[in-house]
Image: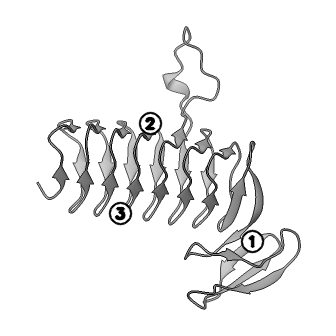
Amino acid sequence: MGFQKHETAIVDSGATIGENTRIWHWVHVCAGAVIGSGCSLGQNVFIGNRVKIGDNVKIQNNVSVYDNVFLSDDVFCGPSMVFTNVYNPRSAVSRKEEYRDTRVERGATLGANCTIVCGTAIGEYAFVAAGAVVNRDVPPFALMAGVPARQIGWMSRFGERLDLPLGGDGDAVCPHTGDVYRLRDGVCRIEQ
């Protein structure tokens, strides 16, 4: 076993867990889950069967990652943030065959208590503010806030706000790394 598991955690037989992943108190990982290396699953986390988690993903306390949620490398899930997997749930109507995929791309941050409505894609290095409710796709490097979430700016890979316009084109430099970001036609990219 190349991962660390607290004695109160339950990891069902069949789950795949990478090297140096840490699983803390009262976590439940279902049998079909695939979890990468170097991850951290905080207290009271649930990981469903049809879930794939990349490397170096941090999932803070009280987060449930339900079926059909896919987290790429370096994703951060803040405390008590919420994923859904059924768009129109009813207790009396089984909709397990209607689960919608939710994809969170490399390096994205999902702030504490935010909600990600199923069927959305969160672009790489996007930043969802605490308490926001995301109900549509989020572009790479976008800073999202509010209910429902709307874009209020741009963020660097380092997690610093970039001085880029919401409309039009522009260039910005991350103050910590010196990386140059170019915004053209609503698409933000790092200059290589």
Residue 71 % position (x, y): 46, 54
Q: Nearer the viewer, mark 2 or mark 1?
A: 2
Q: Say which amino acid is labelled 2.
A: Tyr
- Seen from the viewer's position, the closer of residues 26 and 168 is 26
Quick check: 121 above or below 37?
above
The residue under label 1 is 187
Q: CA distance from mark 1 to mark 3?
A: 26 Å
Which quarter of the picture shows residue 131?
Answer: top right
Residue drawn at point x = 34 percent, y = 38 percent: 44
Q: Are marks 2 and 1 in contact (CB under 8 Å)?
A: no
The local secondary structure at tag 2 comes to loop
Counting residues from the start of the chain, the first of labels 1 and 3 encountered is 3
Residue drawn at point x = 49 percent, y = 52 percent: 78
Q: Are marks 1 and 3 in contact (CB under 8 Å)?
A: no
Q: Say which amino acid is labelled 1.
A: Val
Residue drawn at point x = 57 percent, y = 36 percent: 100
Q: Say which amino acid is labelled 3.
A: Asp
Is residue 12 toward the left or the right of residue 112 in the image?
left
Residue 16: give its label. Answer: none
How many circles with numbers are drawn on the protein?
3
The residue under label 2 is 66
The residue under label 3 is 55
Residue at the farthest left position: 1
Which quarter of the picture shows residue 114?
Answer: top right
Give the color scheme: rainbow, by chain, secondary structure or one colour. one colour
Residue 77 % position (x, y): 48, 52
Quick check: 74 above or below 94?
below
Q: Quadrant of the C terminus?
A: bottom right
- Seen from the viewer's position, the closer of residues 45 and 37 is 45
